[in-house]
Each structure stands twice: as C-alpha cells, then as structure tokens.
Amino acid sequence: IQHKHQINKVLRCSLSSVNKNYLHETNVPTYYFQDSLPKIPIPPLEDTVKRYIASAKPLLTEEEFQNTSTIADEFLKGKGKELQDKLISKDKSQYTPYYNEYWGDMYLEDRNTLLRHTPYIGWADVENNAQMEQGTRATNLIISSLIYFRTLRDEKLNPIIFHQKPKYTKNKLWETFVKLVPRNFAFYAAYAFGAVPIDMTNMKKMFHATRIPQKDIDTTESYPNSKHILVQRGTNFYTFDVLDEDGDLVDEHLIAKNIDYILNREEFDDSGPSIGSLTLWDRTSWSNTRERLVNT
C-alpha cells in the first residue's frame, strides 16, 4: 500500500505538466527542408593554399616559412590537384557537405576524455518541491524525454529556422505556403521570405545511438529498434522498456513502478566495480579495457 501510494504521488506530480502525446505538432515536417539545403562549396585549391600560407606566417621563423611555402607550392602543383578532384567528386556523390565526415572524425579521433567536448542536456529546477523529489524527478525526466523523442522521430518537431523577418514568417499562413512547395525547393522558398532553415542532420543521432571506443578512432552505432533505457544507481545498472511494440510510450504507471523499485525496493549498493566511470577514461585506455571486459 505504501509503495502504491508513492507511485500515485509520483504520477500526479510528474504528469501534471506533460502532454502525453507530442511536445507539439508542427505544420511543416521536421526534416522538410533537408532535401533542398544548399551545401557550402569547396573553395578553389589556390585559395586554400593561399589562406594556409597566410595563417602560418605569424607562427614561423623566416626559414621555416620559406620551407613551408615551398612545400605548399609543390602540393598545389602536384598531389593537391588529385586530392581536390577526389574531394569534389565525393562531395557531389553525397547528401551532406564535404566537411561533415571529417568534422565528425575530428571528435572521434580525439583520444582525450569525453568531458572535453561531450554535449549534455540541463534541466531547470521547478518551483513545486514535490516535483523535485528524486523518484518524481526521475519519472518526469524520462517521460518528458520520451515525448521529445517521439516528437522528433515522427517529424512533429518544429524545424530549426532562423527567422530574419519573423513578422512575415512566424505564422500559420507562411507555414502553409512553404508546405505546398516541393521539398527540393523548400529552402529557397523560405529564404526568399527571410527565413533560413538550419541543417538538422545530427538531430537523428540524439537517440538510439552510442559511441564505441576504439584504439585509433571511435565508431558510432545506431540501434533504431531499441525500446529500453538504462538507469544507474550506485554501481548497479537497470534496464526496462519504455516503448511498446508500436513505438509508443508504455503506461506511465509502469515507468513509475520501475523507478520506485530501483529507489525503494532495491538496496543501495556502491560496492561493485565502478564500470561507469571507465567511460570517462582516455579513449585508448577505455577501448583496451572494454575489449577485455567484452571478451571475459
């Protein structure tokens, strides 16, 4: 009876400020502008080399600068042309800009701890003290996150748009007009009115994805069919499903019951190995250790 009362209390607090379907429903689908976003053009190789030399000059001695200039000139007249042609060819064959893969690899190759550049989500405190209680807070955050996930997954989330003339573009009439434009031209129609849609490619990596440590460069893996979340308390890990077979939220009472079980029915234990902390190790060390754990 005590635990049933606690669960009902959690649900009353956690669901009072949450829409159980979607965060909102946009008139224009979330990724509507993606097919027409213009890509940043590849600059001429001559300009690239010229900018490189200009940026290197303040950092080098006169002798070093002359040596660097000679190497850059040889690159421009030799191997550079071949590489430039390959880059242009690759850019034409893919949807995302030419630098997107290299930009991502820059982070995946970094061997330092993820604390250096891992994004995170911060949650604001609420005025109702009852909603700040641990079980209520955890349940609320889980349900809120799932609603955001469903809104993004089902393309109900508003596209990210920089409105330069909000008076003309932040209204239902403009949205109706843009939605009538074929996707291949939607960006240009929006831009003509002073609205600049932003690339949302990486939004698809927010959920159902993880980063796997490797020795030289990490990899990312996606699991689009996963339906569970993982909760850590102390050194113990718990998983339970939060989506049903249709991809909808499971009953909120079930989520609350699982959180209540972890907090109140399971004895707190921090005596086990702190495996979670290893994920913040430098990537090479974590990769070696993870490989040993997986093969144990």
Image (cartoon, helix red, strand yellow):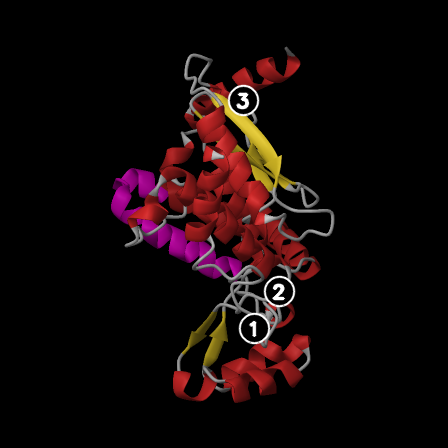
Secondary structure of the residue carrying tag 3 is: helix
Residue located 54% across and 35% down the image: 258
Examine the rendering and report whether any part of residue 141 can be seen: no
Crowding near the residue tagged with mark 3, few <14, some 14–19, many ≥20 C-alpha atoms within 10 Å: many
Question: Is the C-beta separation of discs 3 and 2 under 8 Å?
Answer: no
Kindly identify which numbered label has been placed on residue 155: 2
Question: Is the C-beta separation of discs 1 and 2 under 8 Å?
Answer: yes
Residue located 63% across and 48% down the image: 250
Given residues 119 and 57, the one toward you in this image is: 119
Crowding near the residue tagged with mark 2, few <14, some 14–19, many ≥20 C-alpha atoms within 10 Å: some
Above or below for 108 versus 143: above
Q: Nearer the viewer, mark 3 or mark 1?
A: 1
Q: Earlier in the sequence, mark 1 or mark 2?
A: 1
Residue located 42% across and 23% down the image: 234
Check disc 3 and report the residue beneath it. 287
Secondary structure of the residue carrying tag 2 is: loop
Check disc 1 and report the residue beneath it. 26
